[in-house]
Image (cartoon, grey):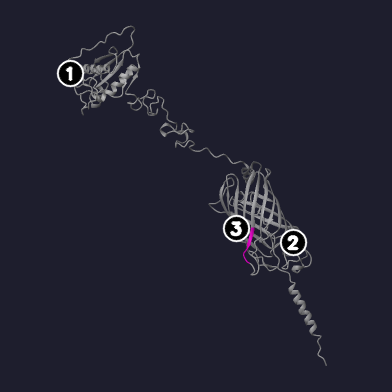
Amino acid sequence: MKPSRTPLLPLLLLALSLSTAASAAPDARFNLQLFRPSGAPQDLVMVTQSRPLSHLSVAAGPYFSYSLNPLSLVPKDGDLGSISLVGNRLQLDVMATVGLFDWAEVGVDMPLVMLQGGQNLEVIGTEGPVESFALGDLRLTGKVAIPGLRRSAEGHGWGSALTLNVSFPTGVQEAFAGDGELTWAPGLVLDYRFESGILLALNGGFWKRPDRIFSGVNMGDMAPFGLGTEVPLLRGSGITLLGMVTGAVGLEKEPDQPRQIPAELLIGLRWYSSTGVTFTFGGGLGCGCSLASPNLSFFTSIIWVPAKTREWEAIERFKEPPKPPPPPVDPDGDFVIGEKDRCPTVAGPVENGGCPDSDGDSDGVVDRIDKCPDVPAGTRGRDGCPLARTVGNKIVILEQVNFATDQDVILSESFPVLEEVARVMEVNPKLDRILIEGHTDARASDSYNLELSKRRAASVKRFLIESGVAAERVCSQGFGRSKPVADNASEEGMALNRRVEFTIQPPVEGPRPPCPEDEVPKKGRKNTAPKPSAPKPAPPAKKK
């Protein structure tokens, strides 16, 4: 009798069925949509800027995105070409954001897969194409400016903020529109706004996702990144150019698989209209560095900010051309600032109120320190004044004529002064005659001082004649101590009273009359000193 084999057949069939079912079990699916836009009107689509919306300002509107081949498989043998599990996808993100206290903003994003299609999913264990219409994972967004790096709406410079995205499992996982679990993504924003309106922004963070092994590829936790810029093209019209590189780095991978880095290069144009509606559209290319990287993508958005809100006003100010820089505090660089600079466009010394120094008489002494700005000082002048000059009816001398003590001998140190008096008379022929006046201080008797003053005046007269002045143009007279100009009670006063003055006589018609000469005493005449050929050293004392 042969043993029966009938019980073995069902067991073999059951084992084959279980083996086939196990091999055909579909892979765990994941949310393939990496296009996660930001809802603020001045954010750079996928790259967030640091400035939150203005307090209690609201922004809302739709984002449309289209991607070509966002999920494709390439068989190992390569004979069949790539298999487009999701060959195209049109998604709508309905977004709304509100600003709080100029420091934070919160928002919501409800994604909806409007249309998608692809080839048969039998290669991953499911008959038929992917579901064409599906709900995505509801996403809540938040942003908080970092103290010390909060940039105001009209400001420029550095800015930084912390962000947080939390997604709830509302999407259809079988349609690759959801992760099936709660996910969260903290991030950091660092950016810089130039005065020209150009914005550079850098985003980085962490995206906590459930581990999903799909076709041997780990699609779990990722580190998203973004680098973007906004460049005003027609700033007054609110038209700007956008550019960004966005993506994510897979933090986990299977030993025999490359690391997943889905990334895209996107460019776009934006128009901030005066109605409060911001239009953005653009597109880009995927890098092919991941299973879920699209070949081509397009996007467009219409974000509305109610008019007359603080955010609308901030956008309108952004559209204004940059104000010209304020004039330099010290445009001529002379360190004289503001109203103190009487010549703000021409450099000049502080002492002259910021104006260039002038020299009206061209004597090398600037007018602000020239005590005689209308008269050249000459080679022997002092403080811009010549040693002798005409002032009214006088020939004024800068230095007193000094004599030897109790004598009519002119000291050599006074020769330059008298020579300058002679020069003044030479260049002024209209000076018909001058009177040389001798004066003394109050020491000694009247008769002594009168006699001494006569001799000293006569000595000066002889010096001028020997210097080339015609004798008929000079007269001399002594006045003793009768005409003091200072108090004789002090040494300073007596020094001022011991003097020689040159008084210009009024012109006369016809021949000049003779001088009413004083009778000069003969006493001391032997001490009278004519102009020597070489100066003699002066004695140390200058007493009368």
In the picture as drawn, the residue positioned furthest to the front comes out as 533
In the picture as drawn, the residue positioned furthest to the right comes out as 1
| Residue 351 placement (x, y as % from top left) | 40, 33
The verdict on residue 542 being magenta is: no
Label 3 or label 1, whichever comes before in sequence order: 3
In the foreground, 289 or 152: 289
- Callouts 2 and 3 close, C-beta under 8 Å: no
Magenta segment range? 247-252
Q: Estimate the spatial distance between the alpha carbons at disc 3 and disc 1, rounded to whole Å.
A: 109 Å
Badge 3 crowding class, 10 Å Cα cut-off, few under 14, some 14 to 19, many 20 or more, is many
Residue under label 3, please give it: 204
Residue under label 1, please give it: 526
Q: Which mark is residue 439?
A: none
- Callouts 3 and 1 close, C-beta under 8 Å: no
User: What residue lies at 73% left-to-right and 65% top-to-bottom?
Assistant: 174
**Badge 3 element:** strand
- Callouts 2 and 1 close, C-beta under 8 Å: no
Residue 400: in sight, yes or no? no
In the foreground, 67 or 408: 408
Residue 69: in sight, yes or no? yes
Q: Is residue 254 left or right of residue 325?
A: right
Can you say which quadrant of the picture contains the C terminus? top left
Q: Is residue 378 left or right of residue 219?
A: left
Residue under label 2, please give it: 86
**What residue type is disc 2 on?**
Val
Q: Is residue 360 left or right of residue 302?
A: left
- Residue 540, by quadrant, is top left
In the foreground, 163 or 426: 426
**What residue type is disc 3 on?**
Gly
| Residue 270 placement (x, y as % from top left) | 67, 47
Placement of 292 over or under 480, stated as above or below: below
- Residue 480, by quadrant, is top left
